[in-house]
Amino acid sequence: MKSRTFLLEIVMIAVAVAFLFPVYALVTLSLKDPGQISQSPLALPAPPTTANFTEAWSAAALGPSLVNSTVITVVSLVALIGFGSFAAYFLARAATRLGYGLYILFLLGIVLPFQLGMIPLYELVNKLGLIGTHAGMIVFYTGIQLPFTVFLYTGFIRALPREYASAAQIDGASHLVAFTRVVFPLLRPITGTVLILNAVFIWNDFFTPLLYLGGSGFETVPVSVFAFVGQYVSDYGLVFAGLVLGALPIVAVFLVLQKYVIKGFSSGLKG
Amino acid sequence: MTLTTRPVETPAAAPARRTRRADALSPSWLFAAPALLIYAAVVLYPSVVGVLYAFTDWSGVGEDMSFVGLANFRAILGDEQAMGSLGNTLLLTVAILVVQNGVGLLLALGVHAKLKSRALLRVVFFAPVVVSPVMVAFLWKYVYTPDPSAGLNGLLGLDVDWLGDPSVALWSIAGMVVWQYAGYSMVIFLAGLEGIPVELHEAAMIDGASTLQRFRYVTWPLLAPALTINLMLSTIGGLKLFDQVFAATNGGPGYATETLSTVLYKQAFVFGKFGYSTAIALVLALFVAAVSLVQMYYLRSREVAQ
């Protein structure tokens, strides 16, 4: 038994090493100059250079993009958690046909591809003057991610005993107070999941910000990196330094929170 | 849980009492109003208008638009690129579905075992999930370089034009998607594995079941809910695949890696055929809806049977 576990450990580590090959290429190439890359593409950088990073940082305008991505992601998350949990409270607790109907309506949003409404939505956003603004992106992400958020919250609230809120209400609290003071704090585990899943999606989304923010000066990180890579396509050292810098914020957040991220992903999706 | 606490009602008295009960103890629908408003504005209204556009010849510029009935859908049937992309999308989806979940399951079984490195392994396998798909695609563009001394070719001593050879390119795209999301499937399977009581395995072991038998008769049936979620997520993800293809090949070489999403993007924003593009989007939506309904029905019924 012991030796079998040991063998499995060796196999899994070997798989992990093979799995990490693209990451090895990413990091080593970002530390090489063009000469090293063409001469010995797979070798370790000797000597490593950081020139690619300083150049990529300014050429891709990553500073402003980081601010844009952060503002859009954080405000969207606050809106999603607020609106999503309130809606789910009604959907999970209402014993009416309306509650069930609305729940199904929200579920529909998980299945509908956004491409179906892509063009009408673009017109709408354009008419409202929200193209190229943070506000436009925030409204978009809130709307597009609400179905999934509502789905996660509703499932969690359904499993929560009603008595907590009833007790508060018998003591004279309104529905609003009972929810915000009593129920919402109990939702912390699922709020963590909602936060993480939506943060990863919003931070990394590429297509919509390309469409709505392209050329506006309010580009998010993936859009800036995309434009940057297009410009320096053949200079792998520089391109990879840009990729490392672009991915670093979300990977750093992940590494700090990884325990909760993995737990949150699984508990949220256990259904 | 809520059902068991509700008193049994006679059918005649039920509607009136339920309404009164809802008034007293259920929160007002106003709780859902803000979310509903935003959801309707961003998803529902544009989707409904999208369905209408699918039956027009709108070019995207000006008000000039006329209803053309089913002409767009007939055009799709005769459009080699669109039909090819439909085939590609289905092939990609099946490949991703099978390989991603197969690999995810094996990884989950591996890191579920009592290994010293299991915490680290979980982090390693999951990390690509949090990176932007566009950036992963750029990274893999290099991994798939045709240069025999670099990338995957250099590592394995091969001479394959991974993204440039039309007969290979689609599978190369599938490979990079699987690399990024195998960790996602792993985590969901892992949640399922952790929910299986140890006693069941112990009992099976006492009965003399082999490792393989325990997997077949204990683990596998109890993984059904995790499998349902995994299959649905990878199917929907595969059918809608855009970023990875757009950044890695832009549908090429030729139309070898074109998917429904890249074709409808090009029809709208390159050729200005907004009506036609939305018709393709509608076909995509119907595919996603049909497949997820069938999967949900079939897999859920399998779960209940356990």
Image: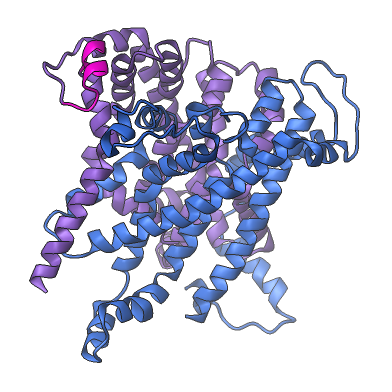
Chain colours: A purple, B blue
Q: How many marks?
A: 0
Image coordinates of residue A94 in percent, x first then y, are 59, 61
Left or right: B125, with B174 as reference point? left
Image coordinates of residue B239 in percent, x first then y, are 58, 46
Toward the left, the furthest residue is: A2
Residue nearest the viewer, comparing A171 with B61: B61
What residue appears at the point 28 percent right and 39 percent down from the top-left corner? B156
Residue nearest the viewer, comparing B227 with A5: A5
Residue B97 visible: yes
What residue appears at the point 32 percent right and 35 percent down from the top-left corner? B152
Q: Is residue A246 above or below residue A4?
A: above
Residue nearest the viewer, comparing A110 with B190: B190
Left or right: A16, with A187 as reference point? left
Left or right: A112, with A193 as reference point? right
What residue appears at the point 45 percent right and 20 percent down from the top-left corner? A226
Residue A185 visible: no
Magenta range is A32-43
Q: Quarter of the image holding residue B24?
A: bottom right
Toward the bottom, the furthest residue is: B207
Image coordinates of residue B126 in percent, x first then y, are 30, 46
Q: Quarter of the image holding residue B45?
A: top right
Image coordinates of residue B98 in percent, x first then y, are 47, 57
Q: Is residue B215 above or below residue A113?
A: below
Q: Quarter of the image holding residue B167?
A: top right
- Magenta-colored stretch includes residue B155: no
What residue appears at the point 11 percent right and 57 percent down from the top-left corner? B116
Residue nearest the viewer, comparing A131 with A57: A57
